[in-house]
Image (cartoon, rainbow, N blue to C red):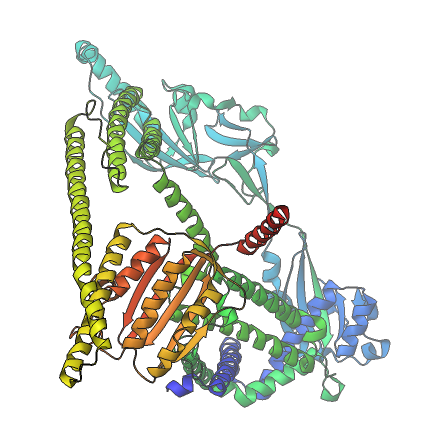
Amino acid sequence: MNKIRGSVIAKMIAWVLCIGGALGTAAFGYLTIAGIECGYYNMTRDEILAEEYRNVNASYSMDAFLNMKNRHNQKYLAEEGFRYGIFQADDLAKVDFQDKTLYMDTNMTDDELKGLDKNKVFLYQIRDLANDGREGRSYGYVEDWEDLSGLQSSSSHLEEQDGFVWSSQYADAVCFDAEQGIFYYRSDEKYYPVREVTMYYENDFGIVNEYNYVYDYEVGKYKLSYYNNEYGIVYEEDEEWVAEGTAREWNATAVEDKVDRLLKGDETQQYVDFAALNRSVLSYDQWSGLLLDQVREIAGEELIAIDSKRIAKSAFIDLDTAPGYYLDDYYTLHVAQEEETAFYWVASLIPDDSTLITRNSRYYASAWVADLFDMYGRNACTMAVSFAIMTLVSFIFLAYACGYRKDREGIVLTWFDRLPLEIVSAAAFFAEIILISILYMQMTSREFRDSIEVLIPFALSTAVLICAIALWYVLSCCVRIKYGKWWRNSLCYKIWSIFRNAFFKVFRNIGLLWKLLLFLMVKTFAEGFILLAVGDGMLLLLWFAETVLLSMAAMYLVIQMNELQKAAKKMADGDLSYKVPTEKMYWGCKEHGENLNKIGDGLSKAVDERMKSERFKTELITNVSHDIKTPLTSIINYVDLLEKEELHNEKAEEYLDVLERQSSKLKKLIEDLVEASKASTGNIEVGNELLEAGVFLTQTVGEFEEKLLLSGLELIVKKPEKPIYISADGRHLWRVVDNLMSNICKYAQPSSRVYVNLEKENDVVTITFRNISKYQLNINGDELLERFIRGDSSRNTEGHGLGLSIAKSLVDLMGGSMEITVDGDLFKVRLNFKLQEGAEELLRQREENNEVQQENEK
């Protein structure tokens, strides 16, 4: 399976199967749906063809009507095999289809009209609306009807479906007819009855009752729809009310009962008389709450009183003059008006002889559809499912295999997969939109639609491109997801990262005081916004005072914390003499500051003790080395003198060789001890100068070629051709390289390679030494840099563990750094120095200055 997922041929086959399966699923799925909707499953081929021809005739009929009296269109339809005539008639039974004067527009010749068979005429009715809309319905052939009056009556439903045009009007006033008790919207001097009125009435007992009424257009009155006091609020009685006694309570009860009877209407049909209510103690200007059509709230005093007897009856709208109207949420009145319509008939013929049908006509396309359904239609559902399964299986394989390449490990991204996801998505989206638009234009264009042989190749190629782009995009998303962290390659993430990094960078570099101010600003804005929304002035004032006090206390606390942070940073930077000013600090900050001061004193004392110990150690090593060096020198001199004497004793000569070897070794150890002590304490003079690293490395390493050959090692030096300059002390750098190369000669695996590389990365120059150790290294690189630490823990080899420590100290003194990496038997040392840019120009100027100086001396 791993080989197949990386195979290009397997992926190409899967691509073809996936796209072909998708197109097959769409085609046979459409065929299945069309067969179910049109009922083709229960028809023979001839019946399907007849139904398709009926649909074509209906389409041609509408086309002919829309292009009436267009000679070009008449010729085009005649070439398509469609013969037609457009006419108007109130009684189809009296129509003479052979009379040319009947038709408003026709493309039939006089001979064709004379030979016209009335029973073969196909009739199609069209309703032309005033707003440029058209409706139509196919009614079939004349021979299908024994009496054309039946065809006439069957189409009468179109005439009954009167169209409406909705117009928006401004209702400039809400009126109340005081004589009839009707509410009206007034617009353009017309009065529209309010359909629904809800009245909220609060009686003297503090109970709010709700009454809902609906206008009855036939009776001309409002009828009670419902009444309740579930939402009423009972208010507490005040002392005045109680003091006035029972008489007033009785009178108020009588008045309330009368008003309640008026609001509930008559007992039988519950029609309310608002005019009578207005004439009672509760006039319309006292109606506190009205809700019109569940949209507009209005008080009674805002109503405009009118007298309908003094206004013309034509100004009042009813269902006969306005079939519909309603008030929207913006108090705009929408009124329905009847739309003028006209009715036309299109009489047409379908060619009986199939040879007369051109290959570019819709009749030919319909025959092609009928043949297609006859061959595949009854198996369309099965084939659609089969193609869907093939598409799914091939897509699953492509989703699994995408991103893998032959002979490559892991997921491999293409250039397309590396583009930002938003750019890819936008490109794929617009490409799909363009291709779908092209496909739609192909399907709807007369030239393409009427030529099935031209339409299918164009539509098929466009559909293939649509599927290919969609599949390419989806697979690219799969590759990104499998590669991991796909969102990092999006423009949104990159923009977010820029703002996020900028925010955190600014936030990290501003002090605690500014952070607190930023927090307080956000907090104050949020709380102030909420309190302003509540609108309580006293609460807002208390909040403002509390915010000011807390802000001042928090700022003072932050200032103290800032002093503590400043002191901690000073100590971290090595300034142990800095003291926190705790005189003006309070609470825990003062205690914390005093603790920091004590820590500084303790660290300062510890550092002084450590420095004193280091000085004592250095002096001890120097003095002891000097004391040892004097007798050692005498021993070496006497050994040298003994070697010049003829002892004639093999044992004595052997002992003398041991003395010479061990005394030399002891001398080297003492010299290294002294040098290590001076290097670690910085007591060595360093004179950095510009060095051409490539030349220096070649010369230094070249001195060890002979030793390397004797050890069976192959030296490979790699350096750039362009000169690279560093700042270093040549003597000390040579000592560092000498130590490293000596270790390589001693400890490298024989018959292996030694690599010395010189590289430049940005402004850093790196010299790398790599070799394979012949001893097992069970130690990390940092430990090897310590004194007296050796990679050979058995100590069976030469050395005393000071060489790498001395080399590191010398590199540090020259301003560089030294790193050791141990990976199994691989031993790697990196020397890092800062690149000296413009060194060539500086050297050239020095040479010119030297030449000028020499000439001046002459």
Residue 143 to residue 343: above or below: below
> In the current view of this chain or complex, which residue is farthest to the front?
646
| Image position, residue 118 (x, y; %) | 73, 78
Residue drawn at 71 percent across, 71 percent down: 446
Residue 810 to residue 541: above or below: below
675 lies left or right of 478: left
Observer-nearest of 816 and 29 = 816
**Residue 538 visible, this angle:** yes
Q: Quadrant of residue 560?
A: top left
569 lies left or right of 89: left
| Image position, residue 190 (x, y; %) | 59, 32
**Residue 796 visible, this angle:** no
Where the N terminus falls, by quadrant? Answer: bottom left
Residue drawn at 34 percent across, 83 percent down: 710
| Image position, residue 295 (x, y; %) | 44, 36
| Number of numbered callouts drawn | 0
Q: Quadrant of residue 392?
A: bottom left
| Image position, residue 707 (x, y; %) | 35, 78
Observer-nearest of 297 and 267 = 297
